[in-house]
Image (spheres, helix red, strand yellow):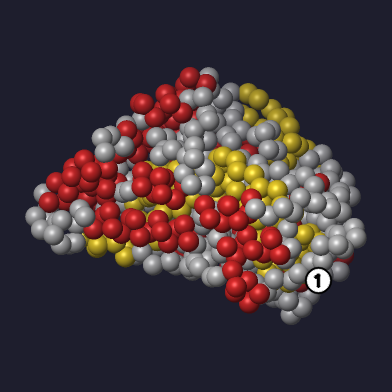
Amino acid sequence: MKARLKTRSIVAAVSAASVALIGFVAVPAQAAARSTVVVIESNTFTSINNLTPDTNIVINGDVAYLTGMGLFHYDDKLNIVNNPTLGSYRVSKNKTGDFEVTYTIAPGRVWSDGAPITAADLLLFHVLSSAAYNKAAGLGDPNSDTPVFNSGLYGAVYDQHVVGTPTLSADNMSITVKYDAAIPDYALNGLGLTVPVHALEELAAGKKSLGTAAENSAATAKFISDVNSKNTAALKLMGPVFTTGYNATTIDSSTNPLLLVNNGAYMIKSVDSNAITMVASPTYNSGPALSGINTVVIKQGIADGSPSAQAIANGDADVYQGQPTADAVAQLKAIKTATVTTTSSLAFEHIELRVASSGTDTYSGPFAMSGGQKAADLRKAFLLAYPRQDIVDKLLKPVNPGTVVLGSVINLPGNPQYEHTAALNGMAVFNAGTQSSRTAAALKLVQKWYPSAGKTTPVAINLLWGSPGNTRRTSEAALIIAAEAAVGFKVTAPATKGWGGKLTNTGYDAHFFIFDQTANPQDAQACGIFQSTGGSNYTGINDPAIDKACVALQSKTLPSSTVTRLRVQIEQAAAKDAFFLGIFQNPEVTAFNSQLANVVAAPLSPSLFWNFWTWHF
């Protein structure tokens, strides 16, 4: 159960015997020159477009990565690897207050329908990221209204520093962005391909079939004109297509083919409740060539425990990466035909408390900042009573004995600054003493407002977590419910299908899930979570101290000592407000058919698929 942190801001109990009912397609182990790989994922696919707040979950991102190629990717050593096959980017001006980056698309690159990829396709990113542009174009203010283009990219570094509208070259193959500061990590925070603009225009016009070359060219030209002229009417037709038009849990021959146009190595052939099937794209020329895998099948919604292990053992699946129980890890390691690795990823489990409104939805629940000292005491009590050590000891250490309760989420264990940050960030109060002493302190805080707490549970909390069937998370929820009841909280926490789309729903008082980091910028993506405008801020927190630190981290390249100091300040503010607490660093358990070459887990999402083009049997 993971949500992806947006790069630019920012699960299932069935018995092993029921695997056959889920829809696995057996692949003969003895087949020569196999070109199909079957992968297990525990979440459920919801959208071709993973850039909206409701669709920003790992499985959607994995499919997007397999079906779309960008200007760079991260390798398993956290290095940025550029993709000159698609194009390039460079700093074209570096003056005080005038920092410009130019992106150039290589000639001859095409979308899967044969339409040329041009720099106009990068221009859409500006519409999806700039609040100033949206307001000027009559599309409303994304920071206070529901955006016409409901992207999760507003409020991030790009939004804060871009000046005007990017400028296209005469041949439309280059585009230049002007910023008001020499922003660090400009590659991560700059323009990227999202969806093809010619297809977006055609979908907005109601077309249901692929266009001709002339129609596609005209649609691209119209998009450039619509953006540069701020054509409100045209943009308002495109916005809903981007926001919800790509959402799909079923894809088949009746699906509008314009929705499936991409520039990736694979194209989506079909999606049903059991699987996503992708096949090699015959027109693909945007990145490295495939090494032999022509079909990728992702079996979705499969439990992380015995069903996944049994599928690998039976040869019904080739690759699994997830959150298994200790028993399931033992099952995986017992499979003679499989290789199993456990690594630490830049992903972490956490508990976060809703403290303020989200967009147009209001929040006045027990943890609301508007509740003053009472709400502050309840937030602190909830976090003090939260059974982090029990969760780690009972559920994580059997999988990875080195797992620790987190003292920082910005500098995770393994980072040289982890101990330093954890000692100074104020989070130690939530790990001081024993759980018994912390629970006693929490009870006193609740009893200030509810004297019967401890004997009754007067404070109702609605807790959101992931899809039904994840054994580890079911156990985690049970530990939380029991621990919080002891201090007066009545926690309601059923498994929730489609949880990722409910994180902005103010009907929930708290959420626990894994944040899956997608990049490694100077702010460590913390600002996506904690900054008031962060694309992954699902708590509603708006703390001036956090925002000030984020502006500093995102405005220029800083010495490492300054970076550490600012990261500490962010977590100090989070500790003061008592709304966010790390639980554990996610142990990335990967199991795969030993005959499948080059499967190497990476610390950043998409951990499993980062080098998919090198896979082969």
In the picture as drawn, the residue positioned furthest to the bottom comes out as 254
Give the image quarter of residue 547: top left
Pick whichever, 55 or 271, lies toward us. 271
Give the image quarter of residue 495: bottom left
Pick whichever, 24 or 329, lies toward us. 329
Residue 339 percent location from the top left of the image: 70, 48
Q: In the displayed structure, does residue 508 sit left or right of residue 236? A: left
Q: In the displayed structure, does residue 46 sit left or right of residue 532? A: right
Residue 284 percent location from the top left of the image: 85, 55
Residue at 65% across, 53% down: 334
Residue 139 percent location from the top left of the image: 53, 59
Amino acid beneath label 1 = Leu
Q: Is residue 124 visible?
A: no
Residue at 70% across, 38% down: 75
Q: Which residue is mark 1?
A: 210
In the picture as drawn, the residue positioned furthest to the left comes out as 451
Residue 136 percent location from the top left of the image: 54, 52
Q: Is residue 292 visible?
A: yes
SS type, badge 1: loop
Query: How many discs mark residues in the rendered view?
Result: 1
Residue at 53% across, 19% down: 559
Image vertical order of residue 569 relative to residue 276, above or below: above
Give the image quarter of residue 546: top left
Image vertical order of residue 113 relative to residue 168, above or below: below
Image vertical order of residue 255 relative to residue 509, above or below: below
Residue count near mark 1 (Cα–Cα under 10 Å), binned few <14, some 14–19, many ≥20: some
Residue at 55% across, 51% down: 4
